[in-house]
Image (cartoon, helix red, strand yellow):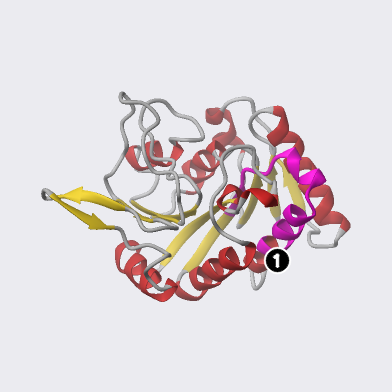
Amino acid sequence: MVTFIPFGEKPNRDGVLYALQLLKRNKLIEDYVIIEASRIDLLSERIPQDRAYVVGEHLATYGIIDRLRPKSLISVDAHTDLMHDYLDHGSWLAYALEGRFIERAAVMAPVLMIPTTDRTQLWTRRVRIYPALLRSRKRGGKWRAYKNFQTNSIDEIMRDAKKYLGGEVYLTVDMDVLRPEYKIARFQHGELTLNELLEILEAIKREFNIVAFDIAEISDRIRHSRLGKRALFEVFQLLTEGLE
């Protein structure tokens, strides 16, 4: 079964329902359920134990992992979602780590990593970041580069992540990780092509046991995006292949 969660503002809700119709029309789904809620605390109470979710606003992932409580999580996203000011789509991962919904996490392929204001804190505990491009941080008074997808191989990153996370993960894929021309999500986009995203997801499938996954930040922009529809189909097919 696939659970569709039209959570968030109207463009996200409409986008998820449109994605449902697309996947049905192309015979990519049979059994499904739609779960709706106006608040994240209500959402987590209603979510079924499933293996595949398609969601609107990425905050819905917070509700899913509150329900499932996986030990480790991988987020493939243009943003780290580690802001630590108030709970929303830009901070859900920070609050999930703080609340011990998950023990450890890895964020793969982000390009937007810094706080938006001087007062915004960035959560850094029990999480590793593997940027899409070369990025550095100050540690012990020296600048050191993150392991990243520009200067490190995918296999190197997967090995490092597996040592940190263990072999079993929940996977969340924010479709804004793709370049702007895919026109799926509502906010700033990332730097990946569809082929690059699929290569990363294939490596995650090879290296980890994915206990469940979600595809997040589907908006109604996808209605008018041929590239966006193709990306949804290919990511969904890859992640559901072999799913029991």
The N terminus lies in quadrant: bottom right
What residue is at 59 percent from the left and 37 percent from the top?
Answer: 187
Residue nearest the viewer, comparing 208 with 216: 216
> Over which residues does the magenta segment extend?
214-235
The residue located at (58%, 26%) in the rendering is 39
- In this view, the residue farthest toward the right is 25
Residue at 28% x, 53% y is 136
Q: Check disc 1 and give the amino acid type.
A: Gln
The quarter in which the C terminus is drawn is: bottom right
**Which of these two is toward me, 158 or 69?**
158
Q: Position of residue 5 (x, y in %)?
A: 67, 41
Residue neighbourhood size for the residue with mark 1, other residues' Cα within 10 Å, grouped as few (<14), some (14–19), many (≥20): some
Q: What residue is pinned by disc 1?
A: 237
Query: What is the x, y in percent for residue 107?
Result: 42, 53
Residue at screen point 30% across, 68% down: 163
Q: Is residue 219 left or right of residue 149?
A: right
